[in-house]
């Protein structure tokens, strides 16, 4: 088992009894990220792009430097095609709104998978409703993977978009991105990948993935909340209309029409979130220092251990593909205990898990459950977290087996 990096994370370091197993929802922030954000505000805080003074120039330099560092982390060679957003949700809505309303028409088809987070399902659903298009949901295999054969049959001449997640947030399934992209390409469809759970755990290499758009969130990859991005192909971004209007995204404003700025500014209206971009760049530096292969190996070792030990408990069901083929997620249920009740019991024992439908109700329906309990691991997790999880689940079973006891 690899060593935890818990000491790098101030919130976790100050509370040894806290077992944080909700990293798929948001990760903790290493000291290097917190220091980078503070350093920007203490030394270089100014509005970039708009000031002819040295402090504004320094802020501009920090902002562009952050974009370059994050682009390098994601394997993006055309740096100006990395657009900053508030996160994955805004990035996917940007594509569905700006590209979708310009290019989707009546009778067109939009294909998503049954694994999708609502952020990569509802925007396409609503676009289909608004444009009289058809939303097609691709089925799953028995072990909750995308059924690539079925997807190939669903995609046809009316397919305009194929949207799918790199990694399932709910059960950790890692999708074959290049295979799915190839199916979409065979009919000329737009390829949209939700990378919220991919970028924190896997080496992305956007230029080699053969997708048109890749969305990601900073807060899931050791960065701050409120910053993320969308990487897109230049030709598509240049052909798309803007998503928002205002300062910095314009070229020239006449009384009766306006023209737009070059990439990336065309899609970044208003004052940018410079400090959090700097913090996200520091997170990329931190993760690269560990190595994404090491990150994934560490998570999978813990995921395998947790899955094996949980399945030894009577009444526990673990969902998803084999543990060594998932990201660091263990989604499970316990007979006769609602996931919300289970999470409450675990919280009283210092174990933080997520309980619910995980913004993936279409998937829950296909699993035949209203909700699951989900434990998710990251670079700061270790074997003691698995021990605490398993022990707390065993104690919860004892509590609920004795009706006279109160929690």
Image (tube, rainbow, N blue to C red):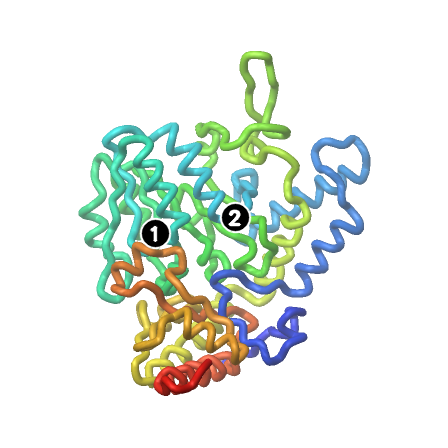
Q: Give SS at disc 1.
A: helix
Looking at the image, is 378 positioned above or below residue 252?
Answer: below
At which x and y percent is residue 222?
58, 61
> Which residue position holds label 2?
87
Is any atom of residue 177 visible in this view? Answer: yes
> Which residue position holds label 1?
178
Is any atom of residue 297 visible in this view? Answer: no
Q: Residue furthest front?
A: 404
Instruction: Decide: few, some or many residues near mark 1? Use Cα within 10 Å; few <14, some 14-19, many ≥20.
Output: few
Residue 77 is marked as: none
At which x and y percent is residue 105?
29, 29
Q: Give SS at disc 2.
A: loop
Looking at the image, is 107 positioned above or below residue 200?
Answer: above
At which x and y percent is residue 16?
62, 79
Q: Residue at x 46, y 38 (%)?
A: 94
Front one among 394 and 185:
394
Q: Nearer the viewer, mark 1 or mark 2?
A: 2
- Gap in angstroms between the C-alphas marked 1 and 2: 23 Å
Front one among 20 and 111:
20
Q: Residue at x 34, y 58 (%)?
A: 175
Q: Residue at x 32, y 78 (%)?
A: 316
Choose the circle earlier in sequence order: 1 or 2: 2
């Amino acid at each position: 088992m690899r060593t935890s990096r818990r000491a790098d994370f101030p919130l976790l370091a100050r509370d040894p009894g806290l077992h944080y197993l909700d990293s798929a929802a948001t990760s903790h922030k290493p000291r290097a990220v917190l220091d980078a954000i503070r350093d920007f505000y203490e030394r270089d805080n100014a509005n970039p792009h708009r000031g002819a003074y040295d402090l504004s120039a320094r802020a501009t330099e920090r902002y562009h430097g952050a974009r370059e560092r994050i682009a390098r982390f994601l394997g993006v060679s055309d740096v100006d095609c990395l657009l900053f957003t508030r996160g994955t949700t805004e990035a996917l809505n940007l594509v569905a709104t700006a590209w979708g309303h310009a290019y989707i028409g009546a009778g067109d088809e939009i294909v998503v998978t049954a694994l999708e987070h609502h952020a990569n399902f509802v925007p396409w659903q609503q676009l289909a409703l608004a444009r009289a298009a058809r939303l097609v949901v691709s089925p799953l295999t028995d072990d909750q993977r995308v059924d690539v054969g079925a997807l190939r049959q669903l995609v046809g001449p009316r397919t305009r978009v194929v949207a799918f997640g790199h990694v399932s947030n709910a059960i950790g399934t890692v999708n074959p991105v290049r295979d799915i992209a190839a199916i979409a390409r065979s009919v000329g469809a737009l390829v949209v990948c939700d990378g919220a759970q991919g970028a924190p755990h896997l080496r992305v290499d956007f230029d080699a993935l053969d997708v048109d758009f890749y969305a990601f969130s900073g807060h899931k990859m050791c960065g701050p909340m409120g910053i993320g991005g969308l990487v897109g192909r230049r030709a598509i971004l240049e052909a798309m209309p803007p998503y928002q209007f205002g300062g910095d995204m314009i070229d020239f404003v006449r009384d009766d029409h306006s023209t737009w700025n070059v990439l990336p500014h065309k899609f970044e209206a208003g004052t940018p979130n410079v400090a959090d971009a700097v913090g996200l760049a520091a997170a990329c530096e931190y993760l690269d220092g560990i190595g994404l292969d090491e990150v994934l190996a560490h998570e999978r070792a813990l995921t395998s251990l947790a899955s094996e030990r949980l399945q030894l408990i009577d009444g526990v069901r673990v969902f998803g593909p084999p543990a060594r083929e998932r990201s660091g997620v263990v989604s499970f249920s316990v007979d006769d205990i609602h996931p919300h009740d289970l999470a409450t019991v675990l919280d009283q024992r210092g174990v933080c898990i997520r309980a619910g439908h995980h913004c993936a109700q279409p998937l829950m329906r296909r699993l035949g459950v209203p909700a699951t309990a989900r434990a998710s691991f990251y670079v700061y997790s270790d074997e003691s977290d698995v021990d605490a999880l398993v022990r707390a689940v065993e104690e919860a079973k004892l509590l609920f087996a004795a009706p006279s006891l109160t929690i």
